[in-house]
Amino acid sequence: MAKLNKRTKKFVKNKLDQTIQQRRDAKKKLKYVQKKGKRGEEAQEPDEMDAASEPEAVANEGTAASRMGVDEFLRGGFREGMEEAEEDEDEEREGGDHYDDVEDDDDLDEVDDLEDEEAHAQDLAKLAETDPEFYKYLQENDQDLLHFGQDNGNDEEDEEEAEDASAKMNAGDGSEDESERILTMDMLRQWQKGLLRHRSPRALRRLLLAFRAALDSGESNGAGRGDEPSAKAYQVQDSRVFSKLIVTTLKYMPMVMESHVPYKKGADGHFKVPTNTPKWQVLYRPVRSYFLSVVKLLRTLPEPDMVYIALNESAKMVPYLHHDRRVTRDYVRALLEQWTSGTDENRLAAFSCLYVTTASALDEEMGDFCLKSTYHALIRGTKITKPHTLEQIALMKNTACELFTLHPDASYQQAFGFIRQLAISLRNCLKLKTQEQFQTVLNWPYLHCLDFWSLVLARTCHVDREQGTPSHMRPLIYPLVQVALGVGRLVPMTRYFPLRLHVIQSMLRLIQSTHVYIPLAPLIIEVFESSEFQRRGKGATLKPLDLATTFRAPAAYVRTRIYADQLAEEFVYVLQEFLATQARHIAYPELIIPMTVQLRRSIKTSPNVRLSESLRPLLDKMRQNATWIEQRRSAVEFAPSDQAQVDAFLQHNTDEAPLQQALRLARKVREQKQRLLQTNAHIVEDDEA
């Protein structure tokens, strides 16, 4: 007879006497059933068909079950033949090797019990088909056997498991360590069949043990206690087997979990997992083991293709992740490592996992952790700003911005705290004026943080997104603008004009999305009135600066013609962008009066030809736009105090203002120029190669 499991022993210990008493009370019914069973045996003809065919094998099992006595059936005889058949089949398929773990990890042992319970339920279902009257008798007189294995067995079962674990430990002290079993392709195929056909928890357990052992193989030397290698359930020696094992585990685990513990997605984006079911209580630890192995895989696997598969497949398991905080935190950290340092494909896949994890966070604490960790990872990833890292940084900022649109309350708290940190750093710099304090502000991470928060506020407070209802993030626009203007004027030296340019570009994005007025014109006109444009520039053979990756110009570029021409071109363009944002406002003619006076004075006093050539067409467009506004506001009948009518001015007019038309053409010219420069750069690199 096959070895009884723990639940069977518990049944014998606690409920056997009650079952015997019930049998004595139903003795007459038992005799009737036994007599009917004997008549069925005499009526059956001997089976002469081939025993290898599957339908006849099932029929033989039913015949054997009908020949058993009731006492033998209740003692577990119905399991004996089936388990012996399973053992014979395993020996034939696996060549006589025993793949059952001798000393497997305790966190996956309960999976075998789950499969035993499922097999018990299948046996009872077969009994209902082969002998319905006997099954009906069990329903009336022996409910404990029908519902066997469905109770939780809380305290007593835990005590038995603890005793068994201690017994194993004591027995293992005097025994010799068994050699690790080598994983083969045949074993993997066998597990795949069990997972595909039956969603077998036992095959899943073996697969997870092999998965963990394969990832721990690099740490076997000196990883155990006392500098001894820890025992592994399986050993992987072939690279093809390793790759097949990784892909099989990643692809089959979500399928098995969805079969045993299906989840539902709520309207709020949270996943509802039935955590009160016995199957979840058993499969919780395998899920934990799976994610711990995935974290190690993401941190150690060098192949980008395998990492991409791991990211995509692990995203399907996120619904089962949030019930373990520690594992969730480790998983988020591993995703952020790929998000900041992986390939573009892996960055997007990691962000997809991170987005689902953040959106489905069960509480505010985990949502705050995801947002805060993402922001810190972004800061670390922007320390090196070079031409080859600009696209990666832009991708990180755009994707991280999406996370701050998921949870409004958590996003506001995090944004408020981080913008406050930027303001404190700026205040200390203005107050103490030490070199260390200046270095905390005049660096790339600080500038990228300003740009990132302008991007977040532009996305969350966009006028099309709000649709009449102010965003919860809108109160943060004012403190961010104050910090940005302070950083722009922090160092008035001409070497730091590129820094001012980056700040202005961030604020322009905020103006275009939120329609908030930010006084950027003084920051721009101060550049035209600086010493860089009031004196004739020196000739130099220097290359033009890449202003996109520069916030402080080298000393060799100061007072040179090439540097002044670059500043003139860029600042005239951002001034045109700023004026285009106000081109449809009813007060535009009055807004440009002081700017017109200052720009004309700059043209007269500056010896820089490039600045004069750029400002004259802009002044003409400013005058044309003022005339265009005056013509349309001459027919209005409301007073300037009527704010609603002032805001609605030209709201339904789809015509482009003269400044908007000029800006659209200027953007096309700049794009063509940038494409031409990139093409020439590639040609030069090919010639040098």
Image: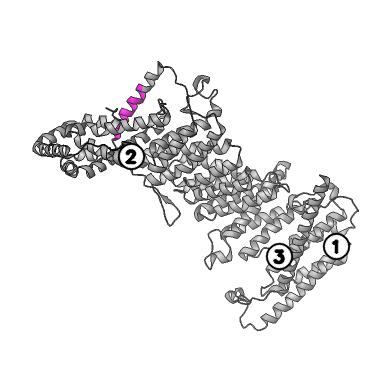
Q: Earlier in the sequence, mark 3 or mark 2?
A: 2
Give the residue number, with chain letter if any, for mark 3. Answer: 578
Which residue is nearer to you in this view: 360 or 635?
A: 360
x, y (%) of residue 546?
Answer: 78, 52
Give the residue number, with chain letter if any, for mark 2. Answer: 53
Give the residue number, with chain letter if any, for mark 1. Answer: 610
Density class for disc 3 (Cα within 10 Å; few <14, some 14-19, many ≥20) is many
Q: Quadrant of residue 308?
A: top right
Q: Is residue 62 magenta?
A: no
Residues at marks 1 and 2, CA–CA distance in whole angstroms = 92 Å
The range drawn in magenta is: 150-167
In this rendering, is residue 427 above or below 184?
A: below
Residues at marks 1 and 3, CA–CA distance in whole angstroms = 20 Å
Which residue is nearer to you in this view: 388 or 410?
A: 388
Density class for disc 2 (Cα within 10 Å; few <14, some 14-19, many ≥20) is few
**As drawn, which residue projects farthest toward the left?**
28
Quarter placement of the N terminus: top left
